[in-house]
Image (tube, helix red, strand yellow):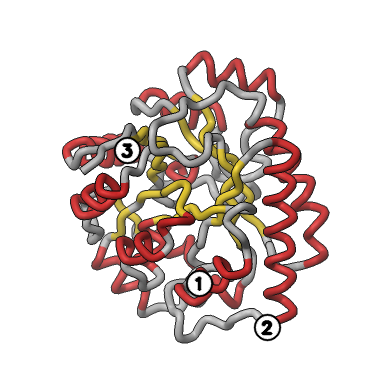
Amino acid sequence: MTSNPITVTCAPCCWGVDDVKNPHLPAWDRVLDEAARAGFGGLELGPYGYMPLDIDVMSEALEARGLSIVAGTIFDDLVSEKNTESLIKQTREICALITALPKPDRHNGQRFAAPYLTVMDWGHDERDFAAGHSGRAPRLDLSDWAALIKNIRTISEIARDEYGVRAVIHPHAGGYIEFEDEIDRLMMDVDHTTAGLCLDTGHMAYSGMDPIRTLEKHWARVDYIHFKDIAPEVYETVMGERIRFFDACGKGVMCPIGKGNIDYPAIRAFLSEKGYGGYITIEQERDPRNTGSILDDLAASRSFLKETGF
């Protein structure tokens, strides 16, 4: 087996930061303080509008804490043609920022240099309430799927051609790229020279996919990985409810890594066999009003992953 270097990072969603309009979000500099205190060398930027887009402010804040930004995030409606101009604006502002900040190290086994641009579809009630339920989740018609693909290509090509940033598409529970058939369709319609994949173990499991089998199937396109874990008893409960994805997270469906039902020793063996190197970002979505245990949870996740060989 080959064990290339892997750096474990985190994301603001560990503090409940997913919707910038939520009035209960912690201050952005507190997230940086606690990420550094928890021993992380890097983190994701979080949703557009959460952290300042000011290069000097962010550079100073990151350097003071020994942190780097491993990925920017677009978490928005990728389907609507009316949203295209906003997506282009976000892409340019995020990429201009992350490419001017202190650079994350590049590791052996890393196909593309960080920082990445993670791209996720979000904002559709009819899919949010069907998160995790492939059989009842509506699919896009040909016209809307074409609009989704056009927006993804536009974002990815701007990131690549104007900023040298690799866009990675992140299938996300509650969005229109969630289930196996949608990932397959996406991979047929978006060329590997345009964008890669960021597969997330927790989202795959939440949506009924086996993480290792899905990683294996799409390995040629996987440039970046997210880790999370699922509390099986909570998962069983929320799968029996009509509930939005982040409301399920507010009930604790995501738990510290190693305390759920995802087989991380097997994932470690798989990644070693494949020679994966680079960055893995751990996440544990939660209600931002429930951040009292965040440092303990991050410590538990990091400790488990270290014991597992990460």
Q: Nearer the viewer, residue 27 or 54?
A: 54
Q: CA distance from mark 3 to mark 2?
A: 40 Å
Question: Which residue is the site of mark 2?
Answer: 141
In the rendered image, the quadrant that contains the N terminus is top left
What amino acid type is highlighted by mark number 2?
A: Asp
In the rendered image, the quadrant that contains the C terminus is top left
Q: From the viewer's perspective, tell me whether residue 240 is left or right of residue 50.
A: left
Helix, strand or loop at disc 3?
A: helix
What amino acid type is highlighted by mark number 1?
A: Asp
What amino acid type is highlighted by mark number 3?
A: Leu
Residue at the spot 42% in from the left edge and 48% down from the top edge: 225
Q: Nearer the viewer, residue 191 or 88?
A: 191
Question: Which residue is the site of mark 1?
Answer: 184
Q: CA distance from mark 1 to mark 2?
A: 16 Å
Which corner quadrant of the image does residue 38 belong to? top left
- Disc 1 and disc 2 in contact, CB within 8 angstroms: no
Q: CA distance from mark 3 to mark 1?
A: 33 Å
Q: Is residue 104 visible?
A: yes
